Image: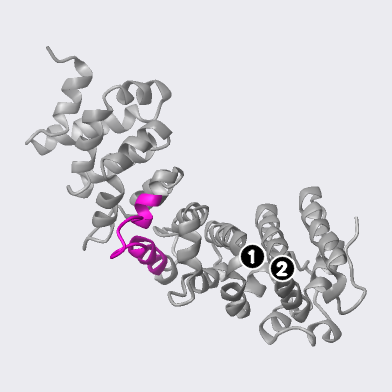
Amino acid sequence: MANEMEELIDFLSSPSPQVKKVAVDIVRGLTGSEDGLQSLASYSKTVLPSLFRLLVENKEVSEPAAEALVNLSQNSDLAAKMIEIGLIKTTMDILYNKGCDITGLLVMLLVNLTQLDAGVESLLQVGDDKVQGLYVMKLVRSFCTSSNEKQDDPFGHVGSILVNVSKNKVGRALLLDSKRGLLKQIIRQFDSTSLLRKKGVSGTIRNCCFEADNQQQNLLLISEFLWPALLLPVAGNKVYNEQDTSKMPLELGSALSIEREPVTDPEIRIQALEAIYLITLQGAGRRAFWSVNGPRILQIGYEEEEDPKVMGAYEQIGSLLVEGNDTEEGSTHISS
């Protein structure tokens, strides 16, 4: 004889829309508490597929189903089970189906599932050479072409997915592939007014820079966009004089010669500095950094910095530049 939980899960497949709606609302409510999550986890083999099937229903049913899955996917064991039964493919298919009205929730579900290595590999479609990278390319296009000016920014969390993807070596290779130009597109989103998007972009750049030793050329090919995204957050708030800006590329010098909005989030500043450090570990990276007057920018930024962790990230680069003084063009340095 079925117990109450089994009956509830059965109702998710009821032919009656009203019964289905009541059942999915109850399940969503259960996922909002730890006890409820644990109870549902015991029935993951039946509840997860039942919820997946509801994602293609009308919004009245698909929305609470998606919310339940987002909550359930915060549990790594349940997330792993979702990946095993192909939820990433299902999610992508629904996300890019005409008339999808739960976009933001599906993107958040992908954020949670790509916290796991298996989720990243599934999203990258590793092992299928014909389509490998297609899902990520679609998400990048949506991230870069959707507006974030509205209060609702359904693709804003794609930045977090890209951070997860860029922790994977195959993911970094895809994003850094100069023929696809994905990282170049992503970097442009750093100009967004959305902090969520900015953090996604800065984290993705930083992770991609772990390939700086063997992808230096591809990184420097997009230096026109890369250096402003990395240096503006750590340049301090002062308006730079002509003597300093004349030694910088136009896009960087122009931005620093006027008043600008400060980047107040220390995490973004640390990620930018870590990316610069990884680039300047290589001789070609240091030469490129000197060519845009990077050390002078960091010197000014360091003088204004108050956060101890961020200051430590400045000092790490300063030590590296002093050690790699074969490329120095002056005596500018950052010291603790």
Residue located 74% across and 74% down the image: 289
Q: Could you tell me the amino acid type at mark 2?
A: Gln
Secondary structure state at the residue bearing disc 2: loop
- Quarter assignment of residue 70: top left
Q: Could you tell me the amino acid type at mark 1?
A: Asp
Q: Is residue 323 visible?
A: yes
Q: Is residue 125 magenta?
A: yes
Which residue is denoted by mark 2 in the rendering? Answer: 282
> In the rendered view, does 108 fall on the left or right side of 5?
right
**Which corner quadrant holds the C terminus?**
bottom right
Residue located 51% across and 55% down the image: 163
Which residue is denoted by mark 1 in the rendering? Answer: 213
Q: Is residue 262 magenta?
A: no
> In the rendered view, does 335 fall on the left or right side of 192?
right
Residue interval drawn in magenta: 121-142
Q: Position of residue 61 (x, y in %)?
A: 21, 42
Whether the residues at callouts 2 and 1 have beta carbons within 8 Å, the answer is yes
